Image (cartoon, grey):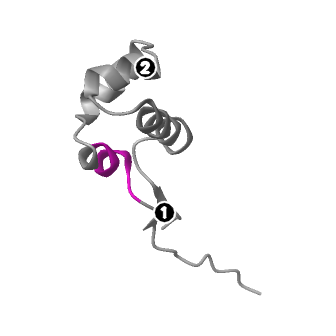
Amino acid sequence: MESFLRSRVPWEAGPNLKEMTDEVGIDLDRFVDSIGANRSDMEMAQEFGVSEKTISQLRNQFYTKGLGTTVGQD
């Protein structure tokens, strides 16, 4: 009996971090640099002119899903 691996095409599981930061007017590179500099949500919110909740949600996206949302295998 032969066993075949089925090829599955990767797909997007939602917007990626670039799309999300673009939507709220934040430069992705600056956002990632701010996380790397260990800035607080409050500091980042002031820097980017958005709410702390927005920063919190973007940070959560970064830590849980990374920069992209492609899943699956080929």
The residue that appears at 27% across and 20% down in the rendered structure is: 47
Q: How crowded is mark 1: few (under 14 residues within 10 Å), some or many (20 or more)?
A: few
Which residues fall within the magenta stretch? 15-21
Amino acid under label 1? Ala
Tell which of 14 and 39 is nearer to you. 39
Q: Earlier in the sequence, mark 1 or mark 2?
A: 1
Reply above or below: 5 against 29.
Answer: below
Main structural element of the magenta stretch: helix, strand or loop?
Answer: helix
**Mark 1 → mark 2, Cα distance in angstroms:** 29 Å
Say the numbered circle drawn on residue 2: none
Question: In screen coordinates, is 21 left or right of 62?
Answer: left
- The residue under the point 34% across, 48% down is 20
Give the quarter of the image for residue 3.
Answer: bottom right
From the image, tell me which residue sits under label 1: 13
Residue 2 or residue 20, whichever sits in front:
20
Q: Name the residue under label 2.
A: 42
Is residue 17 a member of the stretch shown in magenta? yes
- The quadrant of the picture occupied by the N terminus is bottom right
Residue 46's spot in the image, x, y percent?
31, 21
The image shows residue 43, relative to residue 72, as above or below, that is: above
Left or right, residue 69 beside residue 5? left
Q: Which amino acid does label 2 sit on?
A: Met
The image shows a total of numbered marks equal to 2
Task: Give the quadrant of residue 21.
Answer: top left
Nearer-the-camera pick, 73 or 67? 67
Give the left or right position of residue 1, taking residue 48 as reference: right
Give the residue at the far bottom of this rendering: 1
